[in-house]
Amino acid sequence: MSRRTTLDGMRRAVRSTRAWARAVAPGALPDFLIIGGQRCGTTSLHNYLAEHPQVRPATGKELQFFSIHYGRGERWYRGHFPAPMAGRQSFEASPYYLFHPRAAERAAVTLPQARFIALLRDPVERAYSHYLHTRSYGAEPLSFGDALAAEHDRLAWALRAGPDSRAAHAVLRRFSYAARGRYAEQLERWFRHVPRSRIHIVRSEDFYADPATTYAEILRFLDLEPYLPPRFAQHTRRVEWGAPPRQARDSLRAYFVPHNARLAELLGWPDPWPA
């Protein structure tokens, strides 16, 4: 286990303990969520929204209540949020929510009036970024090509006991390189439980290219006043080292053609990432 993984686990444990302590007088449920996708710019968006004067964030990013910690109950979840305040909204960001098979249904039941934001990045670039991230903390021993070839069997094995087993959480989060790029099927699941009007979908490339315009559109969706965070001018796209091997890249491009077409039809978009 890497030092980074150990530290992340310790931080989550401390945050969870504090949430249980605050559950005696829990806060309000969140007004909106950033639901994903992973490696699509959610951290930058989380930070910018957290700086808005009408917004108060949860105690930390990735609470994972509707995915991993649903069994802890609503009071535990409320323990991560501030008390209600007129004219203020609270939120959290857990990129696993978009992909987790049961998160949409759970969120719809618990947050019947909430709004949701999804960022979608070129699925080929997203897959390789995900792979590099998993490699960075020592959880992926395979090459990118071999990891893609192993993905189906890995996920099938993990899901034998259902999507809420410990094995499923570990494998679904770490090794879902191609699966997470099948955005249409994930959004269709969310649309079955949440009205389309309460889900705002952003192409990550638009956020990278013109963050001010994209951010302003998100604020309008959330009924928040126009605002430009002090650090906004420093926005830069995450730089990732290297590119995927050509054979794996070309194979993924071909793989995603029908999935991207399905997404374009679902959202009324032109082809978002032409092959």
Image (spheres, grey):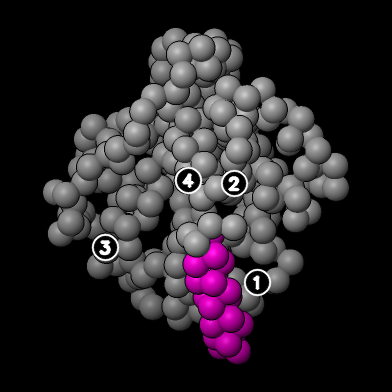
Question: Where's the N terminus, which quadrant?
Answer: bottom right
Q: Amino acid at mark 2?
A: Ala
Q: Real-space Cα distance between discs 3 and 2?
A: 36 Å
**SS for tag 2?**
loop
In the image, residue 263 lies in the stretch drawn in magenta: no
Magenta-tinted stretch: 5-26
Could you say where residue 116 lies in the image, as x and y percent from the top left?
Answer: 48, 49
Mark 3 near mark 2, Cβ–Cβ under 8 Å?
no
Q: Which mark is residue 139?
A: 2
The amino acid type of the residue labelled 4 equals: Ser
From the image, give the main secondary structure of the stretch colored magenta: helix
Which disc is residue 52 wearing?
3
| Residue that badge 1 annotates | 74
Expressed as whole percent of the image width and height from the top left, the position of residue 273 reads 41, 18
Q: Which mark is residue 136?
A: 4
Residue found 42% across the figure and 39% down from its top: 40
Label 1 crowd (10 A; few <14 / some 14-19 / many >=20): some
Badge 1 vs badge 3, beta-carbon distance below 8 Å: no
Please say if 273 is above or below 117.
above
Q: Residue at position x 44%, y 23% from top?
A: 244
Above/below status of 265 relative to 58: above
Instruction: Indicate which disc, 1 or 3, sits on the residue closer to the N terminus.
Output: 3
* Residue at left offset 60%, top offset 38%: 141
